[in-house]
Amino acid sequence: MKPGIHPAYGPVVFRDTASGSAFLTRSTLTSEKTIEWEDGRTYPVVDVEISSVSHPFYTGTARVLDTAGRVERFERRYGAR
């Protein structure tokens, strides 16, 4: 890789605003806001609206849509041509 063309890659805390949970990972994102983490160090914090902690698919609260009804409606409209 060429030196000097890639963004800095370092530790960042992502905080889920929907659930209030936070996790430390590495990213190229940065922020002016900081937070003191459990290890006593200060890291930049990025607020996200949804993460795997609050997303319905990962929490098991996702609704299953009626796909059979959609397929039947499509076949009625356009038929098997």
Image (cartoon, rainbow, N blue to C red):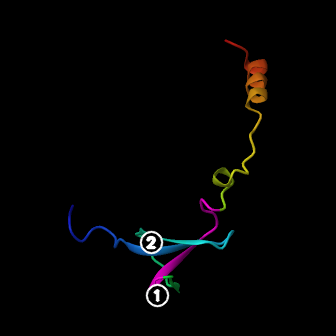
Which of these two is toward me, 72 or 41? 41
Quick one: label 2, few (<14), some, or many (20+) residues within 10 Å?
Answer: some
**Residue at position x 46%, y 87% from top?**
40
**Residue at position x 75%, y 38% from top?**
65
* Residue at the front extreme, as displayed: 39
Q: Amino acid at mark 1?
A: Gly
In the picture, the quarter occupied by the N terminus is bottom left
Answer with mark 1 or mark 2, whichever residue precedes in sequence: 2
Where residue 9 appears, x then y in whole percent? 35, 71
Q: Which mark is residue 29?
A: 2
Quick one: label 1, few (<14), some, or many (20+) residues within 10 Å?
Answer: few
Q: Relative to residue 30, is residue 3 drawn left or right?
A: left
**Residue 44 sits above or below residue 58 on the image:** below
**Residue at position x 41%, y 69% from top?**
26
Where residue 10 appears, x then y in whole percent? 37, 74
* Residue at the left extreme, as displayed: 2
Q: Relative to residue 55, is residue 12 drawn left or right?
A: left
Q: Amino acid at mark 2?
A: Leu
Start and end of the magenta stretch?
39-53
**Residue 16 sits above or below residue 71 on the image:** below
In the picture, the quarter occupied by the C terminus is top right
Q: Dot 1 corresponds to which residue?
A: 40
Which of these two is toward me, 77 or 12? 12
Q: Relative to residue 77, is residue 41 drawn left or right?
A: left
**Residue 71 sits above or below residue 39 on the image:** above
In front: label 1 or label 2: 1
**Residue at position x 66%, y 72% from top?**
17
Which of these two is toward me, 75 or 22? 22
Q: Which mark is residue 2?
A: none
Q: Give the structural element (helix, strand or loop) at label 1.
A: loop
